[in-house]
Image (tube, grey):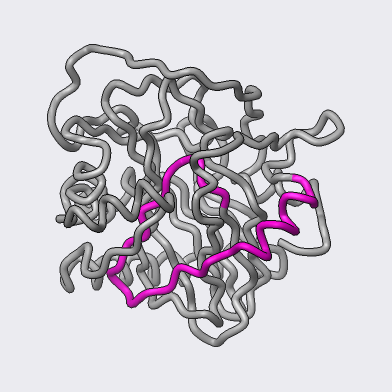
Amino acid sequence: MLSESQKAFFWEHGYLVVEDAVSAEQLEQLKNTFSDWVEDSRQHDTAYGTLSDGRPRFDLEQGHDADQPALRRVSSPEEISPHYYDVMADSGVTDAVADLIGPDVKLHHSKINSKLPKSATVVKWHQDFPFTPHSNDDLITALLMVDEVTMENGPLEVWPGTHKGTIHSLWHEGQFTGAVDDAITSEALEKRIYCTGKAGSVCLMHTRLLHGSSQNQSDAPRTLYITVYSAADAAPLTPSPVPSEHMGMVVRGTDKGHIRSVPFDVERPELPKGASFFVQQKQQEPDHA
């Protein structure tokens, strides 16, 4: 799936955008399924559905209503949609991840993050690893662009190279906020690169890369199917913030029964009590996100 130059770019910068990661048919199925969920969300005014830990599956942004839906998160869509399951388990996305951290790869969790037109959804700057620490950091977050991602509809923003540096705290004044502090955010905004692409592209992101995104300023939706994979020898150290009945499923190679550890220091995360980490990030409101 990936060339040697693409793999080298990923390990140097911590991210890589790859076009045509799924077939046209797969992409259409993902779009139609999510559209159905958006239509269903018009009937709800609070987070709804149920995950295995009792929290809601479908999360709504503030301001959501029947006329202007703002469905921002669907947790573990592979549990309720065969189309999302198929892309998670066996697609060009899976092949690309295996090229980087394979040959043995397993699922950690997945979710949909969407920014519907005129919704207020933002993602504050953070790294994924402090949410999902493992015995080693061979984890990749694969962000599949279900819609075209443009400069106007809230693209992923990354700070290249930060996967090689510090694991930053998401705790502030005794509270788990799910975001880095204002000083790091300010520097990130100066160093950021935007990850745009046509629908069907995937952005592969190292688990320690600093990233965030801003509000959708357009009339076009920006929906990402986000799947987190790990090397089979990476053992999770804390419960998943997004539980899935398929967690630990080997999608490439085999699980050889080994655990590989590397040295690092990270604070234990706090599991979200609400529908998603967006609730945690609302506890910290810097001037920019």
Vertical comparison of 68 with 244: above or below: below
Position in image of residue 3 (x %, y %): 17, 57
Q: Does 181 sit left or right of 51 as displayed?
A: right
Residue 8 in magenta stretch: no
Task: Identify the image quadrant of the C terminus.
Answer: bottom right
Image quadrant in which you'd find residue 196:
bottom left
Q: Does 283 sit left or right of 107 as displayed?
A: right
Please name the residue shown 66% across and 41% down the image.
274
The span shown in magenta is 181-210
Q: Nearer the viewer, residue 226 or 29?
A: 226
Image quadrant in which you'd find residue 285:
bottom right
Position in image of residue 254 (x %, y %): 14, 25
Please name the residue shown 19% across and 30% down the image.
104
Q: Nearer the viewer, residue 209 or 145?
A: 209
Q: Nearer the viewer, residue 269 or 71?
A: 269
Image quadrant in which you'd find residue 260:
top left
